[in-house]
Image: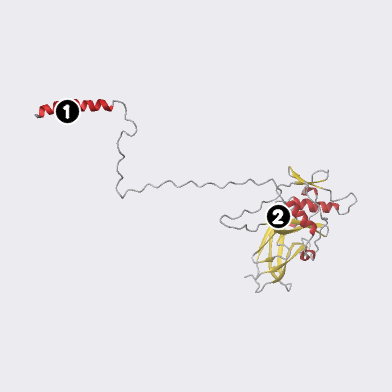
Amino acid sequence: MSRRRAARLTAPVLVAALLAGGCGPPRSGDLGPAPAAGPSSARPVRSPEPMPVPSREVAPSPTDGPARAPTPAGTGSRQPATVTVELWFVRSGQLVPTRRTRPATVATSRLALTELAAGPTPAEAATGLTTLLPTGVEVTRIADGVAVLPSVASADDPVGRLREAQVVWTLTQFPTVRRVRFDDGPPVGRADYPGVLPPIVVTAPGVGARVGAPLTVTGSADVFEATVSVRVLDAAGREVATGFGTASCGGGCRGTYRVVVGWRTAREQRGTVEVYEVSARDGSRINTVAVPVVLAPGA
């Protein structure tokens, strides 16, 4: 067959093939096979990593204290959790704070009042601390920042006001308690019990604490020119450290203070931390608060 005849026969066949394929846009899959993979030097495509699932946060329950510490992830047993509460005992007709660390509980108000009624430790009692609160006193409810509980004082009770102050100062340490109401009386707060604190209050260290150098002494004070002095005595009564600081308010108002002191001792021994005011009249130590402690060796 000649070339010219072959060309005539081929043209109709091509036209028929094109008509059979249609004139519309190509459908998915009509573009042919995907291109071959690139050269081996191309960066491999990584399959997407699964997104981490965030742990669900449980909203804290409306209790009157801190929640129990959670179990650390990856451990098979619950770690011991504790809570520290501040207790306000009585010495010489005024309030003095101390602390207790106990197993954690959501009922911190009940824990605090139970510890307050139980009274000071023997070491604390040796410094003159006592409690006026009887056992069995409990908060009945807490609503809108007010803790409600039965009356702890009677009209002819000579120490009733101080007993109430013990309760008020102890309960209002918790963020959910701003005031306290006894029976059907009006809500009261710390400001309703003026004069129940001594000129100098020591919040740390506590009685019998083992302390190391440097030691940070904290508390509140209402002293002349807001100056608070500290000295540390060893077991023999020798002065091994001194220091002073300035309260955040002075001259007729109470402010907080923080004094850091250090010492040098070769062995662990009993000691005393004294916090005092220097008299403006004769330079003597006045309003002294003595806290017995255990001194760790200091360099």
Q: Position of residue 198 (x, y in %)?
A: 78, 57
- Decide if residue 99 is in sight here: yes
Q: Position of residue 91 (x, y in %)?
A: 81, 60
Q: Position of residue 15 (x, y in %)?
A: 21, 26
Report which quarter residue 69 is drawn in. bottom right
Element on which disc 2 rests: strand
- Considering only vertical position in the picture, is 212 above or below 168? below
In the image, taking residue 287 as reference, residue 104 lies left or right, namely left
Q: Which mark is residue 10?
A: 1
Mark nearer the N terminus (1 vs 2): 1
Report which quarter residue 85 is drawn in. bottom right
Q: Position of residue 117 (x, y in %)?
A: 80, 57
The residue nearer to you, when weighing 173 against 238, is 173
The residue nearer to you, when weighing 136 against 37, is 37
The residue nearer to you, when weighing 7 against 141, is 7
Residue underneath mark 2: 256
Residue lying farthest to the front in this orientation: 1
Q: Amino acid at mark 2?
A: Thr
Residue at image point 20% right, 28% down: 14
- Considering only vertical position in the picture, is 167 above or below 274? above
Q: Quadrant of the N terminus?
A: top left
Other residues around mark 1 within 10 Å, as few (<14) / some (14–19) / many (≥20): few
Q: Amino acid at mark 1?
A: Thr
